[in-house]
């Protein structure tokens, strides 16, 4: 209370001064008739309210905190069908002439107006906020879809989920005096669905005891409500338990929202190099196939990694 006494005293003196002017007629209005007195009283009341607001605002402004927290940016990391991490990058500004340490904080995450989880922690190694300086820190929030769907009902098919993080950070100076600073920032994220890889029948154009010319085809389906752009896709193909091809599909391939992208790989095998037993594999109506691959991917929600491995029987068709 001692710290704010001069501020409150000045605000009271200012308030009394202007109040005296209002009540004594210090603010002169043009002469008005009796029927306009109500308008004059309204103007006086409005001015009276404004003076109160100015006095209070002046006192509040003088009591400004040393530490402020603002949002620098936010991004989504580690996104897959199990969940994602929503990272808030916070800018902590210290306007005082002494350093502070961030010693503890607590926060809660609210999704669709429902509490998802909360956390309270003390830092073993406090974070130093230098005097008259700015420090950037990250606040990662792990979203696990299974836990989220259990806490918030009916959002499994939502295209975009709204939420926010709110909490309190506690800072201490060299004399162990605390300054508590609240924060609240919004954050949106998707319900991400894995891209689906579908292997098509093998089309054999030529088959001889010496080798085969064929086409391996597959498609990539995007069940999300946003486009996905695949980078260089590395793949490996095995047929009948034998590796037959590996390589990279270069370039950026866009898979539109709720769309599908087809890929076709024309291949030639030399059985004298890969093994003559592959002739019997290609001469069947179907064979065991293992198809795996990975590629970097980008979307409006950030970057992630496509990785897949499929083991199934595929048809072998001769053209």
Image (spheres, grey):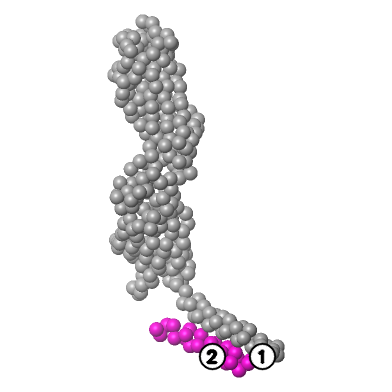
Q: Residue 183 is drawn in which quadrant?
A: bottom left
Residue 305 position, x and y percent, is 40, 37
Q: Is residue 57 left or right of residue 233?
A: right
Q: Is residue 35 above or below residue 312?
A: below
Residue drawn at point x = 40 percent, y = 85 percent: 2
Find numbered disc 1 in the image and state the secondary structure of the residue it sits on: helix
Distance, label 1 to label 2, CA atoms, is 28 Å
Nearer-the-camera pick, 290 or 53: 53
Helix, strand or loop: magenta stretch: helix
Q: Residues within 10 Å of mark 1 (few under 14, many from 20)?
A: few
- Tag 2 or tag 1, which sits nearer the N-term? 2
Tag in front: 1 or 2? 1
Residue drawn at point x = 40 percent, y = 11 percent: 318
Residue where numbered disc 1 is placed: 34
Residue where numbered disc 2 is placed: 16
Q: Residue 242 is drawn in which quadrant?
A: top left
Q: Is residue 259 above or below residue 287?
A: below
Question: What is the magenta range?
Answer: 1-26
Residue drawn at point x = 36 percent, y = 15 percent: 316
Q: Is residue 309 left or right of residue 224?
A: left
Q: Residues within 10 Å of mark 2 (few under 14, many from 20)?
A: few
Most extreme residue toward the bottom is 24
One can see residue 138 in this view: no
Residue 299 position, x and y percent, is 47, 41
């Amino acid at each position: 209370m001692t710290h704010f006494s001069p501020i409150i005293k000045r605000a009271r003196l200012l308030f009394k001064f202007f109040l005296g002017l209002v009540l004594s007629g210090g603010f002169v209005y043009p002469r008005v008739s009796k029927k306009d007195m109500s308008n004059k009283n309204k103007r006086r009341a409005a001015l009276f309210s404004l003076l109160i607001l100015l006095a209070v605002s002046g006192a509040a402004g003088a009591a400004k905190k040393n530490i402020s927290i603002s949002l620098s940016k936010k991004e989504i990391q580690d996104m897959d069908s199990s969940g994602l991490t929503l990272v808030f990058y916070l800018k902590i500004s210290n306007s005082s002439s002494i350093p502070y340490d961030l010693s503890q904080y607590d926060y809660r995450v609210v999704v669709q107006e429902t509490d998802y989880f909360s956390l309270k922690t003390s830092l073993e190694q406090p974070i130093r906020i230098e005097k008259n300086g700015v420090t950037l820190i990250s606040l990662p929030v792990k979203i696990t879809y299974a836990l989220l769907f259990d806490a918030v009902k009916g959002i499994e098919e939502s295209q975009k989920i709204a939420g926010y993080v709110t909490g309190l950070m506690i800072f201490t100076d060299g004399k162990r005096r605390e300054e508590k600073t609240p924060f609240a920032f919004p954050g949106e994220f998707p319900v991400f669905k894995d891209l689906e890889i579908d292997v098509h029948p093998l089309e054999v154009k030529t088959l001889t005891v010496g080798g085969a010319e064929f086409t391996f085809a597959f498609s990539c389906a995007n069940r999300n409500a946003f486009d996905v752009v695949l980078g260089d896709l590395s793949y490996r193909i095995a047929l009948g338990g034998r590796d037959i091809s590996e390589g990279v599909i270069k370039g950026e391939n866009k898979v539109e929202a709720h769309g599908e992208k087809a890929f076709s790989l024309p291949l030639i095998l030399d059985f004298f190099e890969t093994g003559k037993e592959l002739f019997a594999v290609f001469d069947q109506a179907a064979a065991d196939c293992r198809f795996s691959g990975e590629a970097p991917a980008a979307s409006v929600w950030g970057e992630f990694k496509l990785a897949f491995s499929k083991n199934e029987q595929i048809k072998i068709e001769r053209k």
